Image (cartoon, rainbow, N blue to C red):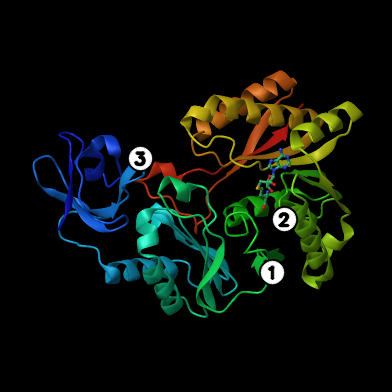
Amino acid sequence: MEAVVLKPGREKSLLRRHPWVFSGAVASEPSVAPGATMAVRGADGDVLGYGSWSPLSQIRVRMLAFGRDTVPDADFVRRLVAASVARRAGCGAARLVNAESDGLPGVVADLYSGWVVCQFTSAGAEYWKWTIADALMEFLPGCRGVAERADADVRAREGLARGGFAVLRGEEPPEFVEIDENGLRFLVDVRNGHKTGFYMDQRDARAAVRSLASGREVLNCFCYTGGFGVAAAAGGARSVVNVDVSEPALALARRNHELNAQTSQTLQTSQTPQTFVCADVFKYLRTCRDEGRKFDMVVLDPPKFAESRSQVMKAARGYKDINLLAMKLLRRDGVLATFSCSGAIDEELFLKILAEAAADAGRDFQVIGRTGHPFDHPVSLAFPEGRYLKGEILVCRG
Ligand code: SAH
């Protein structure tokens, strides 16, 4: 088998089962096709494991198996998919495969009520695409179809073509797929929505917001399709203002609110007036400040501000800015549910940014809860890069 040979001393991370080999660690390259599986040898020639070859990426190899005994083939990949699906057994809407942390680098598969939407963002993921689609059809009970979204920018870094939405196996999903999250209903636009359509990684955080929302005037910033707004209404919020720059996202947020207001199970939501504002949150928070508006709960769930470590300082300023402004809008005992999905900003730094924002706002806050990855977005201990989502639930004490 063709092999990548590492430079002396560069086998350490593989021995700790970290799944990435960077270009700087590679002494000699194999002549295999992008995405193909090859052995990885240490400088002494020992086989350390097997991975997928990404000749154009800084991450040259993404590991599939460690040690010399397991040579990954299609059946190996099928079994990984089966195991990953089995760990989410019984879920109607869940992440079925969470990339490196489930042993399948670059592969994301999200389940929305029988329809699976995948993203393949590495050469190896693309190489195994059809095997994975077939395995999802085979091992997921009630699977109606497997589609892919090939519009993620990161595909370019691996030399993969940018595409759109395509059905790989099974049926074409409807225009909007309805899912259930903690007893609430959401329409998901699997073709045009962000990523695969819905931010299921915030499921636990929405439940936390719901449990704290009773009687509160809520400002839901970066609302996308209304997840936190619907949750707050279901928790008995007095009112919810939803803000986003995207008109299509707001249109779906409105529909999701109406969908839940109609169902008897969530009667509370029909009594909560919701408004939908198309605005830049950075500006909208300043407008609220200038108008002297106050809220009892603010949700801040911005997009990723730091794409890489080089953007950490700029991102930190962005997080501080919106959090400082939000803190000023809160009444005493008000709740700030604030999130960061930038992997390059760890929780310690995020808390530091929040502490600085509170100091500059002249307010006292306590942390009363933290949220993070739900069970279907697991993080492998060997792959801390997989931990991107942080949530802090703060209460204003004065
Ligand atoms: N809270 C959402 C997910 C947020 S995703 C949920 O629960 O589903 C981030 C959202 O921020 C996107 O919908 C994007 O359109 C929006 N966004 C990005 N920059 C923005 C800005 N400057 N002002 C307002 N919205 C913004």
At a point 54% along the width and 44% down the height, the residue shown is 389
Disc 2 or 1, which lies upstream in sequence? Answer: 1
Q: Which residue is mark 2?
A: 225
| Left or right of 69 in this view: 118 | right
Q: Is mark 2 within 8 Å of ligand 1?
A: yes
Q: Position of residue 197 (x, y in %)?
A: 62, 59
At a point 55% along the width and 55% down the height, the residue shown is 151
Q: For label 3, count other residues whose C-alpha is less than 10 Å away and answer few (under 14), some (14-19) or many (20+).
A: some
Q: Nearer the viewer, mark 2 or mark 3?
A: 3
Mark 3 lies on a secondary structure that is loop
Q: Which residue is mark 1?
A: 176
Q: Are marks 2 and 1 in contact (CB under 8 Å)?
A: no
Mark 2 and mark 3: Cα distance apart in space: 34 Å
**Amino acid type shown at disc 1:** Phe
Quarter placement of the C terminus? top right
Mark 2 and mark 1: Cα distance apart in space: 12 Å
Q: Which residue is mark 3?
A: 58
**On screen, 271 above or below 47?**
below
At a point 56% along the width and 61% down the height, the residue shown is 164
Q: Nearer the viewer, mark 2 or mark 1?
A: 1
Mark 3 and mark 1: Cα distance apart in space: 37 Å
**Amino acid type shown at disc 3:** Gln
* Residue 332 in view, yes or no: no
- The answer to which of 232 and 134 lies nearer the viewer is 134
Disc 2 or 3, which lies upstream in sequence? Answer: 3
Disc 3 or 1, which lies upstream in sequence? Answer: 3
